[in-house]
Amino acid sequence: MTKRTNFKGTCMKRLYLIRHAKSSWKDTLLSDFDRPLNKRGLRDAPFMGQRLHEHHVHPDIFVSSPAKRAIHTSQLLAQEVGFPQEQILIDESIYEAGVMSLLQVVHTLDDRANHAILVGHNPGMTMFAQSLARVPIDNMPTCSIFCVEFDSSSWKDVKMGNGVFVFFDSPQKTSAMAGSWRAE
């Protein structure tokens, strides 16, 4: 796996937690790991990627669960924000991860990256989002995005509760949501 080297070098870290897009349960013989995106997922992932692009989100690093639906979501999002799909990192520990496992993934991110996207699964993503900024989010629906900032130059400094909530968005929200996004 390759890593991007065009990092910007500021003292603010911004993390985008994204739950994979809607997946198909049509083929009951497939394992959970191998489930593909369904029609809604194939529509929602590019839509949310366009939303990120419209708000000038330019990730330095993109990390995905190895599950088929998470990788496909990552590829569709990356395409919309102009991130090279071949540079998406796959981290085995994101699949079925809890809060502490996801925190460990964040701690291992390259500190040259200031904007990171993690694509994973519930319930871990919702619980992780809740714990980082102490924001009451009941559930991260499929393809939703939770963004949090940290006043730090190192991902290793990320701790539960020390993040600043930036925005929460999902395909079900109206375009009026765009007004609540805070500029970088």
Image (tube, rainbow, N blue to C red):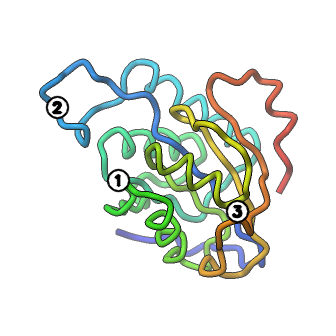
- Tell which of 50 and 92 is nearer to you: 92
Q: In this figure, which residue is indicated by the disc labeled 3?
A: 14
Amino acid identity at mark 2? Leu
Quarter of the image where the C terminus is located:
bottom right
Query: Which class describes the residues within 10 Å of circle 2: few (<14), some (14-19), or many (20+)?
Result: few
- What residue is shown at x 64% (from left), y 22% (from top)? 172
Earlier in the chain: of badge 1 and badge 2, it is 2
Q: Are marks 3 and 2 in contact (CB under 8 Å)?
A: no
Looking at the picture, does residue 86 appear above or below residue 167? Answer: below
Q: Spatial distance from mark 1 to mark 2, Cα to Cα?
A: 16 Å
Amino acid identity at mark 3? Arg
- Tell which of 42 and 156 is nearer to you: 156
Q: Is residue 37 left or right of residue 156?
A: left
Q: Is residue 154 left or right of residue 18?
A: right
Q: In this figure, which residue is indicated by the disc labeled 2?
A: 30
Mark 3 or mark 2, whichever is nearer to me: 2
Q: Which mark is residue 95?
A: 1
Residue 167: x %, y % from top left? 76, 45
Q: Spatial distance from mark 3 to mark 1, Cα to Cα?
A: 22 Å
Q: Spatial distance from mark 3 to mark 2, Cα to Cα?
A: 35 Å
- What residue is shown at x 74% (from left), y 38% (from top)? 54
Quarter of the image where the N terminus is located:
bottom left
Q: Helix, strand, or loop for circle 2?
A: loop
Residue 26: quarter of image: top left
Amino acid identity at mark 1? Tyr
Query: Which class describes the residues within 10 Å of circle 3: few (<14), some (14-19), or many (20+)?
Result: many
Residue 4: x %, y % from top left? 52, 70
Earlier in the chain: of badge 3 and badge 1, it is 3
Looking at the picture, does residue 56 appear above or below residue 102? Answer: above
- What residue is shown at x 48% (from left), y 72% (from top)? 104
Q: Is residue 148 left or right of residue 156?
A: right
